[in-house]
Image (cartoon, coloured by chain):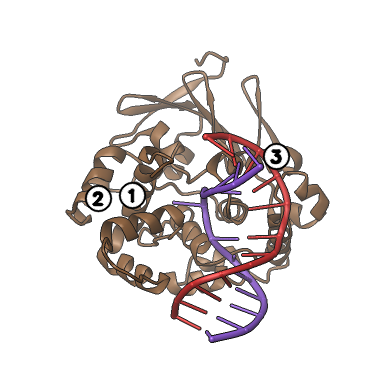
Chain colours: A brown, B purple, C red
Amino acid sequence: MSGWGFPLSRIAAHDFDLALTLDSGQVFHWVKADAGFSGVIGDVPVYVEQRGESLAVSKGAGRVVRRYFALDHPLSEIYETFPKDEPVTTALGFCRGLRIIRQPAWECLATFITSSMKQVAHIQQMSHAIRRNFGERVVLGGAELFAYPSAARLAEAGEPELRACKLGYRAKNLLAAARMIAAGEVDLARIEKLDDERAVEELCRLPGVGEKVANCVLLFAYGRLAAFPIDVWIERVLRELYFKRKRKVTAKQLKLFSQKYFGRFGGYAQQYLFHHARKTRRKGE
DNA sequence: CTCCAGGTTCCGG
DNA sequence: CCGGAACATGGA
């Protein structure tokens, strides 16, 4: 039993760091609760708590949790494919146990549409506001949680209601994207069948989705572990650590370099470099 | 107050 | 293809 009076069950979780994973900027709605975290996976309210090499999870959620947190990813095999250079080695030492999770495609996509030019803290606020205002309310023990609203649900919202969630100019994009998905103009299930390049192209048909967001979705929702999103942090890392004394380095060059240099699990390397940079960089530098 | 944040889009070289 | 600018909002 947990402190809030719902039953727990235990599942094995080797090479997994729950807190690290939830703090790595992949997903934005989990909250600390008791000795663990509570959140919603799809429409299932879940409590998760790390206990060494296993997890205590709210009863019945074991299978969903295993899949969501990608406990089947072969981390040691993935680490072996990493380039043996200083930046990646340092990031790996900092991030061991961080897993690339498998989020439901729509909520991942929608959340990253709202992420542009926003700090993680603010993305969290927007995610919570959208869930609270439009999402299905679910209950776990005494606590109430909210699922992410479907595309169809958001499609019938008004732009002012979305702006009330502090989305700013992103409201228009999220609304338009929700309408296209709800209308079947873009089919997220079909993305599964496309190769990475085609999938990015298809996702980029949605307003507010460019290459960076599309790659985040491939990586964090579709399990395309080679996808390598290049945001401001990773761009800095690449420029400063891999192109140290180069005059002009274009976006195209950064993309080509990262795709061939980091290999078939480049997404993992990217996430480790990102998280390490974000957590260790002081503002003056 | 200023700076900047897990960008995208549009526009002129 | 490349560099700039506009676009909202709130932490730091």
Q: Nearer the viewer, residue A76 or B5?
A: B5
Residue at 74 percent across and 60 percent down: it is A172
Mark 1 or mark 3, earlier in chain: 3
Q: CA distance from mark 1 to mark 3?
A: 29 Å
Q: Are marks 3 and 2 in contact (CB under 8 Å)?
A: no
Mark 3 or mark 2, earlier in chain: 2
Identified by mark 3, the residue type is Ala
Mark drawn on residue A87: 2
Identified by mark 2, the residue type is Pro
Label 1: which residue? A273
Residue at 58 percent across and 63 percent down: it is A188
Q: Residues within 10 Å of mark 2 (few under 14, many from 20)?
A: some
Mark 1 or mark 2, earlier in chain: 2
Q: Position of residue A122 (x, y in %)?
A: 60, 41
Identified by mark 1, the residue type is Leu
Do discs 3 and 2 belong to a common subunit? yes
Mark drawn on residue A129: 3
Q: Chain of mark 3?
A: A
